[in-house]
Structure formats: C-alpha cells, structure tokens
Amino acid sequence: MRRRLLAVVAALLLVGGAAGTATAAPATAPATVASVQVPSGVTAGVAVFDRQTGAFTEQLNASAQFRSASVVKLLLTLDFLWNRGPDYTVPAADRARLEPMLRSSDDDAANYYWSTYGGSAIITRMVSRLGLSDTAPPPTGYEGYWGYSAISARDTVTIYRYLLDSAPAPVRDFVMGNLRQSTRCASDGFDQHFGVAGAFDKPWAVKQGWSGSSFPEGTCGSAASAAGTTVRAKAVDLTRPALHSTGTVGAGDRSIVAVYTLHPAGTSYGKAYTDIGRLTRSLDVPGATRPAGWWYGTWSEHVNVRRDPSTGNAPMTQLPAGVEVLIGCQKRGQEVQVPPYTNDWWAYLPQYGGWISNIYVSSPDNRIPDVREC
C-alpha cells in the first residue's frame, strides 16, 4: 500500500473533482438549467436536437454567440462544395486538404480556403444559404481570423440538420464520413476526443474546436502550435479559453449535439477538457450509449498511455495534463516508481485502448477501490 503525498498534489492538479471521485458529478454543485450541469466558472451554450421526434431535448443559452474556433471549418467545407453539382466530385488536391481539416482539424487547410474563397464572404454566403440566425464573420480588425467567426449552439444544429436532411447525398456522405473518422490527435497535437467523443460510445461524428492562450502545449506526445491569440472585441468573447464539441450521436445520427464553452483565464487544457466532458455527460441525448467504467482524475504532465501494463514499449500517446479519464478495469503489471512511491497496478483506458500506471490516478490506494480487475 502506498501512502501518498498525492492527496495534496491531487488537490492542486486534479481536474474538476476530489481525489478518488468515480462519478461524473463535479466536486462543487454546478449551475443547473434543465438537466445541463455546468461546472463552476464555465460559460456554456448548449443545444441537443432529437431528429426522431423533431424536438430539442436540451437548450441552454442556445442563441448565445461564441467564437467558433475550428467548428467554422464545417462552413468552409460546405461553401467549397456548394456549387459543384450534380456529382459534387472533390478534386484530389482538395480532398488532401479537406479530409485532414475535417478529421484532424488541420489549420493550414482552413487558412487556404479562407484566403482563396473570400474570407468573411464565406460566412456571409453560408448565413444566407442556411438561414443562420447568430452566425457572423469575424469582428472588424480581425477579418483574417476564421476562428473568430461568431456561431451559436442553435445555428450549429441548423448546420447539421442541413447536412443530414437537405444536402446532396455526395456532400452529406463526404462531410459526415470524415467526421466519423475524427482522429484522437489533431494536426496541431491536441487530444480532440473530448466532449461528445468522450461522453458517448460510437457511433458518433464530431467536429471540435479549441482556442485560447491557456492551451499552448501539445497533448498527444507531439509539439503543437499555440491554439489561438488572445484579443478583445465587444460582441463575441475572444479572450477566455474556448473548448467546443459538436456532432451527432447514435444510430442513424439520431441526436445532434452542440456544446460551446468558455473557461476562466488561465484554465489548463486538462481542466477544460474535464469540465466539458462532465457537462456533456449530463445531457439528455436520445439514442446515445454511455461507456461503461469509472471516471477518475489523473495528476502529472506527460502521462504515457501504453499498449500493455509495462514501460517496456513505446507510448501510444500522452494524456492531457491532469485530465479525467474513463477506467474500464485494472490489473497488476510492471512496478512503477515515482519516489517515494511505488505501484504495480495499472488502469486500462478503453477510450485510448491502452494502459496507464495507477500511480498517476488520483486515488488514495495502489489498487483503486471500486474498479473491477481485468
């Protein structure tokens, strides 16, 4: 048994909960509207639309404008495809840009389409074409920043409803097919399987967004560029760190989910990742299947995810620092030392398909009390 100083460390490093918590509930009482649980300090805009009943199951600040970050890449793609009928063939050079832009949120591709096809005019065209209510180009002085376009949760539902119900079949299949192949590691090195991608089992299709000077480090074991510049504008908040998760969930894309969040200045990526995860897991999403397991916080930076419970193989990836993870089961493996502590128990993370040492799990004992053995 280890007696860790980590109870203190976890209090400082654990994301969004007390050490050893195994539920989705935050340590402090959240602000609640309907069933939406918003962690303290977070500003959120949420919409969940059930395509089977044609009704919203969740709406919280659904018309509030947020800076879009990479969610705007949906509009860049649709604008490019708009007048390419009747077959809507995507040239090879554009497929090589659009596929990583949709799957891995590639910014270089977005820069290309923004500069080539008119910048802010793209947003103006798509607002008119789709009948969007809250979407707008970047504010004056920031016309070159596609991620500063304004968007809302309800407009995001409208975009997905167009894709699923009205778009030509080749457009629907191309866009949604790529969103179903969302990569865990984005092109800039960020772990982008937060929110919808973490809260629910597949089938899902997602387009995520993140922006803010609090998120400078890569989280998939590779270097990353800074995710956005901190500036100020009157209409849309361009200052606080933003993390957004949008997409569809369930068989037949039954539910459309849009979750937009802003976090207090200085919030770490792991904390924001955990907070949007807890918020998303609180939602009423018809057709969704929630993954089995236990949610626990982690501590330390650069925690490696391994293919088996040992350090004898190269890491598969790394966790965002201090993030909350889903643990499916645990078993004994190679002993790991973080002086003065040692631990030979390992946790299996089903959403990563790999293992982390229990020494990095915020639990008071080497063996996590309520997690089953593999």
Image (tube, grey):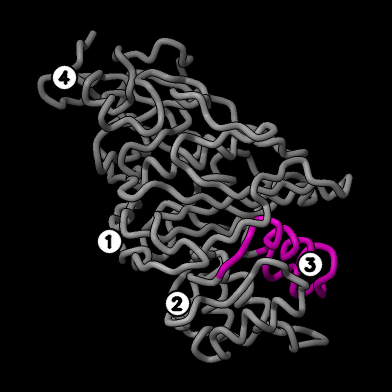
Give the camera-side residue of 14 and 220.
14
Mark 2 crowd level (few <14, some 14–19, many ≥20, 10 Å Cα): some
Q: Earlier in the sequence, mark 4 or mark 1?
A: 1
Q: Residue at x 22, y 26 (%)?
A: 9
Q: Which mark is residue 341?
A: 4
Which label sits in the foreground, 1 or 2?
Answer: 2
The kind of residue tagged 3 is Tyr
Residue under the image location 77 percent in, 38 percent down: 286
Magenta stretch prevailing secondary structure: helix
Q: Using residue 301 as the reference point, say whether residue 297 is left or right of it.
A: right
In the image, which residues are magenta?
150-177
> Regarding mark 4 in the picture, which secondary structure is present there?
strand
Between the residue at mark 4 and the residue at mark 1, the CA separation in whole angstroms equals 30 Å
Inspect the image, locate mark 2, and give the three-letter code of the amino acid beneath it.
Tyr
Q: In the image, 149: left or right of 11? A: right
Q: Is residue 220 above or below residue 124?
A: above
Residue hosting label 3: 162
- Disc 2 secondary structure class: loop
**Disc with the residue nearer the chain's start (3 vs 1):** 3
> Element at badge 1?
loop
Q: Which residue is mark 2?
A: 145
Q: Amino acid at mark 4?
A: Tyr
Q: Which residue is mark 1?
A: 223
Kind of residue at badge 1 = Ala
Earlier in the chain: of badge 4 and badge 2, it is 2
Residue found at x 66% / y 45%: 60
Indicate the secondary structure of the residue bearing disc 3.
helix
Distance from label 4 to label 2 (Cα)? 47 Å
In this rendering, is residue 44 above or below 87?
above
Residue 101 in percent (x, y) is at: 52, 71
